[in-house]
Structure formats: structure tokens, C-alpha cells
Image (cartoon, helix red, strand yellow):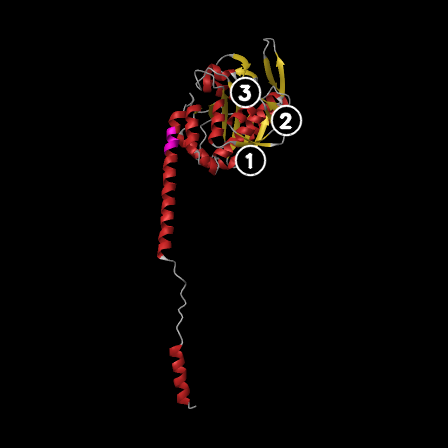
Amino acid sequence: MSEFSRVDRLKNEERETPIVKDNKPQKPKKKRKTFKRIILVLLALLIIFAVFSIYKLFSLSDDIHAPLNRETSSYRNSPVSHLSGYPISVVIFGVDSDSERGLASGERSDAIMLLSINPKKKTTMMVSIPRDTRTEIVGYGTVEKINHAYAYGGPDMAVDTVENFMGAPVDHYVAMNMDSVKLLIDSVGGVKVKSNGTFTVKGIEFVEGETYHMDGDTALKFIRSRYEEGSGGDNGRQERQQLVLESLATKMLSPSGLLHMNTVFDTLGDNVKTDLSSREISLMALRYYGAKNNIEKYQLEGEDVVLEDGLWYFIPNTESFYDIQSKYLENLELQ
């Protein structure tokens, strides 16, 4: 074969060989449009959720906001700044719901819990104060059970009395009807709590160390039990209050809890009072959120005694009290 014939054959083969383009397969336009629509719908839902949350938060603030009659705690030189995430102290009063005057005053606080929240260390210290603790009722001029302060003078007298007893600032308060705990638990679909004792209350049996999914009614019975054998008396009840409230707070801040936000807000509006404004609530939710994962729970040690007036009182153990007070102030970075 001549050289010219070989060249012609190669040229013909090149013309017959198909040209393959190195292009990636293109997504169908229809699928791209569908994906964009889904993204737009999700963004729209997110915006609606955010707007609704802000609306409910401000509406809630109008319902629950009840400021204290003071500028700041007498144990502070100036108000704490939520913008800087400064450690704060909050007292929670659980008030019996039978009072005709509601959360204003007129009813004793069934539960008293102090929380020092440090967003820098991401630590929360929770201290239960027995309702029968004997102390001075600030502004009333008597020495009697600490839970009487709320009945005599509402949140103002109760906060002043707790501050004086603890020797530490209380920056904010939250007062809630005890029945609202039941409603809140039901509104988020129940809570999981590990029992701190083995006892039976109103036909419901609890075993120490076992974890139970409780509805609101069961949780309230669990909280209030103190006379049943194995319940641990007042100390056991205080620990159960801490366990249930911790679990409830965790559930309310979880994704599943947020799905029930509307019901939660409606329940809070009818059953809670606080000196916190909507702005402070939203800032605290952002600044102090991390501290919820490290909660240290404490109970005052002491003894129950009957004094000359014939009433039962709880008298704190001095050493135990000062140890807890020191830790509380340390978590507030005041010591």
C-alpha cells in the first residue's frame, strides 16, 4: 500500500470516529424548579414561625410582666446587664392555685427555688429552700416560716425575704401556680423523670432509679408526695421538684417542645408572673442557654422542730448553709 493510500485511510477513520463531549449530565429543569420551590416554602415557613414567635413573646410579656418595686437588688451596686451575659440570680416561687388573689399575694409559696446562672462557666446552681424555714419576714417585722412572705406581701416581700435569708442577690423572680406545672407538662407531651425514691402515692407506684414518662397529673402527684413511706419527707419532695422542673425546662427548649409553643405560651400567660420583660426573656434565652446543660442541685440540711408557738419549723444547719451560700455566691462571681 502506498504512503498516500495509508494517509487517506487514516483521514477517513478520523472522520468516522464519533466525537464524545466531556460534559456532566444536566439535571432536568423541572427537578431544579421543584427544589427551588421547596426551599422557598421552607424559608416562608421559617419566616412565619419567627414572626409568630416574636408576636407570641410580646403578647406573653403583657400577660405575665409584673415588675418589682425597686431598681435593683439591695445586694447589687447596679442592675446586672443581660447584654454582657453577667451571672444572674433568679428565684422561682411555686404558689398554691387555690388563692382568689392569684399570683399577686394572699397565698403561701409551696415551693421556693433559687438559681444562680453563669453563662461564662455554663453552670447553673439550683438551691431548694424548705417552705417551713424559720427566718425574718422582711418588711413585716416577724420571724416565722419563709413561705408566709409571699402571702403577706406578694413577690416584693418574698424576694426581699429570700435575699435576706440567703445573703445573696435575687435579680429576678418567677411565680407560677403549681397547677400550671401540670398544664405545661401536658402541653409538651409529658416529661421523663428518674424517681428518687420507692413509694406509692394515690395508687401510683414509683421505684427508685426507674425512669418514668409522666403526664401532668402524675408529675404533680410525684412532686407533692412527702408523707408516703419511702418518699423522703420534705427533702424528698424538694428533690422531686428540682427533677421535674429541670426535665420540663429541657423539654420546653427542645425541638419537640417548640412545636407546642402556642399552647405553652397560652399556659404561661394564665399562670405565671415575672419581673422580666419580653426583651430580657429573649436575651436570656440566647445568652444563658448553654448553662442548662450543667445543673448542680442542692438542698439545705437541718432539722424539723416544734417551737414555743406550737408550729413546725425547719432550722438550717449552720455549716451546711454557709457552704451552700459560698458556692452560690461563687457561681455569681461575687466571691
Bin the neighbour count of mark 2 within 10 Å (Cα to Cα): few under 14, some 14-19, many 20 and up.
some
Tag 3's secondary structure? helix
Tell me the amino acid under the disc marked 1: Asn
Describe the element under mark 2 as helix, strand or loop: loop
The stretch in magenta equals 55-59
| SS majority, magenta | helix
Task: Check contact, mark 2 vs mark 3: CB within 8 A.
Answer: no
Q: Give the number of callouts.
A: 3
Q: Amino acid at mark 3?
A: Phe
Task: Give the residue pinned by disc 2.
Answer: 198
Q: Earlier in the sequence, mark 3 or mark 1?
A: 3
Toward the viewer: 306 or 164?
A: 306
Dot 1 falls on a residue whose secondary structure is loop
Mark 3, residue position: 165
User: How far apart, in angstroms, are the residues tagged by discs 3 and 1?
Assistant: 26 Å
Which amino acid does the dot numbered 2 rest on? Thr
Quadrant where the C terminus sits is top right
Real-space Cα separation, disc 2 to disc 3, in angstroms: 33 Å
Residue that numbered label 1 is attached to: 294
> Residue lying farthest front?
203
Q: Quadrant of the N terminus?
A: bottom left
Residue visible at 50% across and 12% down in the picture: 141
